[in-house]
Image: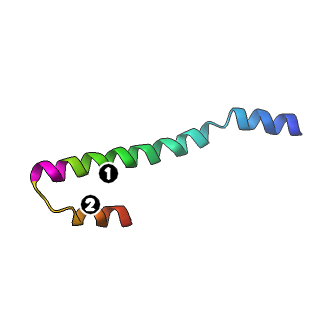
């Protein structure tokens, strides 16, 4: 059982898939922050996005 559990942990692709959405969210936040700076919009919207 322990060996199978180790194999499952090694093949734990869903964990990596869970990490990618987090990274994509960070990239989206950074991109939105850059867009807000370029458009000259206030960062209050960015702070509100962080709360979600």
Which residue is disc 2 drawn over? 46
Residue in the picture at 17% in, 53% down: 36
Colour scheme of the picture: rainbow
Taking the spot 60% from the left edge, 41% from the top edge, the residue there is 14
Main secondary-structure element of the magenta-colored stretch? helix
For image coordinates 57% across by 39% down, the residue present is: 16
Q: Does label 1 or label 2 sit earlier along the sequence?
A: 1
Q: Taking 48 as reference, is 3 left or right?
A: right
Q: Is residue 10 within the magenta segment?
A: no
Report whether 41 appears left or right of 32: left
| Label number found at residue 29 | 1
Residue 45 image point, x, y percent: 23, 64
Magenta region, residue range:
35-39
Q: CA distance from mark 1 to mark 2?
A: 8 Å
Instruction: Tell me if residue 35 comes above or below residue 45 in the rendering.
Output: above
Residue furthest to the right = 1
Q: Secondary structure beneath disc 2? A: helix
Tag of residue 37: none
Neighbour tally class for label 1: few under 14, some 14-19, many 20 plus, Cα within 10 Å? some
On the image, the x and y values in percent for residue 2 come to 87, 39
Q: Quadrant of the N terminus?
A: top right
Q: Quadrant of residue 44?
A: bottom left
x and y percentages locating residue 52 in the rendered image: 38, 65
């Amino acid at each position: 059982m322990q060996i199978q559990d180790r194999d499952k942990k090694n093949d734990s692709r869903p964990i990596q898939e869970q990490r990618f959405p987090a990274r994509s969210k960070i990239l989206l936040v950074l991109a939105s922050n850059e867009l807000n700076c370029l458009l000259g919009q206030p960062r209050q919207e960015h702070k509100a996005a962080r709360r979600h």
